[in-house]
Amino acid sequence: MSSDNQFTALGPTIIGFQTNGSNIERGAEVQGQKLGIRAGADDGVGVHGISHKYFAVLGESELWHGVQGASSERAGVVGLSAKQEGVLGMGEPGVLGLRAQSAEHARNGVMGLNEGIDGAGVFGGHRATDSLNPPLGQSAREFGTCAEPGAGVFGKSTDIGIGVMGQSRFGSGVVGYSEGGVEFTSHGVVGVSPQLAGVVGISGDRPEAGTVLPPNHVGIYGFCASGLGAVGTSRDSVGVLGVSESDRGGQFESRKLAQIHLVPMKLASKNDPNGFVEGKGGDLLAIEDARSGAGDIRHSLWFCVGKNLDSGMAEWVLIAS
C-alpha cells in the first residue's frame, strides 16, 4: 500500500501513474541502489519507449553494457525498422558477436539469414573517407545488393579496399565449399574479373611491377619469387590441362633456360620404352639410359605414334639420344 516510502496504485484503471509533459522537462526520474526501474507485463510489453525525434530507449553505463536484453526462449534483442537498419552499432568494433561457451546449441558468434532469391545473409561494406572519394551514406542501399541467386555473405568496397578478406594464423584464410553439380555455378571458389585475372595466387613477396609478366586478362595467375608459380597434381588423371579452340593449348617461355623440362623416367635395365611404357598418340617421353655410368648419365627422347597393330601396345619412336 501507499506510504511515505512507497507509492502503490491498486486500480482498476488503464494507467497507474502518468504525467502531462507539456510543462515538465522529464516525465520521471527514478534511482535505486540496485535497480532504477523494473517494469513487467503478464501479457504485453515490459517497457515501451516512444520518441518522435530521438532514441525511444537510451541506456548508458560507465563500466558495463549500455543496454542488455535476455530471453530464455527467443532473441535477447530484436530491432525492427520500416525504412532503415533494424540494428545499428557504432564503436570499436561497430558490432561484436560472442558465442557463449556454455551454450548447448550455440555455434556462431554472428549469424545473418536472408530468405529470398537475392540479397545476402550478412553484408559488409567498405567506403573511402577522403576528399577524392566522397563517402557513400551509411545505408546499405547505397552500396547496392547481392544479385540473384543471393549469398550467405556479401562484401563490397566502393574504392580500392577489399570486399571480403579472410586471415588465419595457422589455418586457411578463406575456404569455399559446394556440393552442387552445375558448371560455373557450383564450384567451391570462383573468381571473376572483367578486366584482369579472375584469381591471383601469390606466395612470399609480392611481384615488382615491370620485372615480371603481369596478370593481364587471364583466368588464373600464380606468382612466387623463388618457388613454383603454379602446380597441378592428380592421382588418376591429368595434372594440368590446357585447351584452346583457336590457338595453342599451351605456351612456355623462359628468359635464361629451356622452355620445357621433362623429368626423365628410369627404366630398369632397359633403354627402349616399347613394350614397357603405356602411351597414346602424341605423348612425349624422356627416359634415363640404363647403361649410363656414374657421372655419365645419358637420356633419350621418344614420341608415341599410336598403338602397334601387331602387339596392341604403344609404339614409341626415338627422336634423340
Image (tube, grey):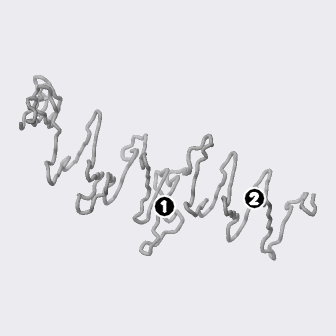
| x 28%, y 58%: residue | 207
Q: Quadrant of the N terminus?
A: bottom right
Residue 183 location (% of width, % of height): 36, 44
Q: Mark 2 — residue?
A: 47
Residue contact between numbered discs 1 and 2, judged by CB atoms under 8 Å: no
Instruction: Examine the rendered structure and indicate whether residue 239 appears above or below residue 67.
Output: above
Instruction: Examine the rendered structure and indicate whether residue 282 appears above or below residue 171.
Output: above
Residue 205 location (% of width, % of height): 31, 56
Mark 1 or mark 2: which comes first in sequence?
A: 2
Residue 33 location (% of width, % of height): 79, 60
Q: Nearer the viewer, residue 81 or 162?
A: 162
| x 79%, y 53%: residue | 41
Q: Mark 1 — residue?
A: 125
Instruction: Examine the rendered structure and indicate whether residue 161 appears above or below residue 281.
Output: below
Mark 2: few, some, or many residues within 10 Å (few <14, many ≥20)?
few
Classify residue 188 by image quadrant: top left
Q: Which amino acid does label 2 sit on?
A: Val
Residue 108 location (% of width, % of height): 56, 47
Cα–Cα span, label 1 and label 2: 34 Å
